[in-house]
Image: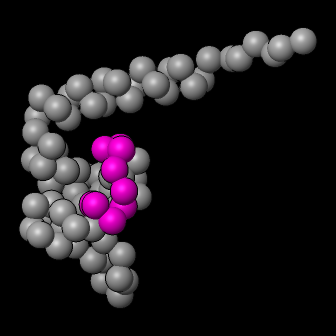
Amino acid sequence: MEKFYRLTEIARILRVSPLTVRRWIDEGKLKAFHPAGTRLYRVPESSLKEFVGKEWWEQLFASRAEEEVEEKRPRRRRR
């Protein structure tokens, strides 16, 4: 099953404003849809991967995995 992203998630991943993501959707650069009965956008992972490119996608998620490891490390308390 394919993963779907919200605009805010994409903005955080790509480090841009949610308004920038909405503009890309409005301009047709990024494919998205509205789930039935909502005004919210959802972007399939395949569309996001196509938008950023395969190489950049792999680099992006490799760096995100490293960041998550850094966040999970216990931090030393200062005394």
Q: Residue at x 31, y 71 (%)?
A: 41
Foreground: 57 or 79? 79
Q: Position of residue 62 (x, y in %)?
A: 31, 23
Residue 46 in sight in this render: no
Residue 78 occupies quadrant: top right
Residue 78 in sight in this render: yes
**Does the magenta run of residues contain 76?**
no
From the viewer's perspective, is 10 left or right of 55? right
From the viewer's perspective, is 35 left or right of 74? left
From the viewer's perspective, is 14 left or right of 55? right
Which residues fall within the magenta stretch? 13-21
52 to 7, vertically: above or below: above
Q: Position of residue 40 (x, y in %)?
A: 36, 75
Residue 14 occupies quadrant: top left
Q: Residue furthest bottom?
A: 37
Q: Residue at x 46, y 25 (%)?
A: 67
What is the image's colouring?
one colour
Residue 24 occupies quadrant: bottom left
Q: Position of residue 71 (x, y in %)?
A: 57, 25
**Does the magenta run of residues contain 19?**
yes
11 to 43, vertically: above or below: above
Q: Residue at x 35, y 82 (%)?
A: 39
Q: Residue at x 10, y 47 (%)?
A: 50
Badge count: 0
Q: Position of residue 22 (x, y in %)?
A: 27, 67
Quadrant where the C terminus is found in the figure: top right
Specify the principal SS of the magenta part. Answer: helix
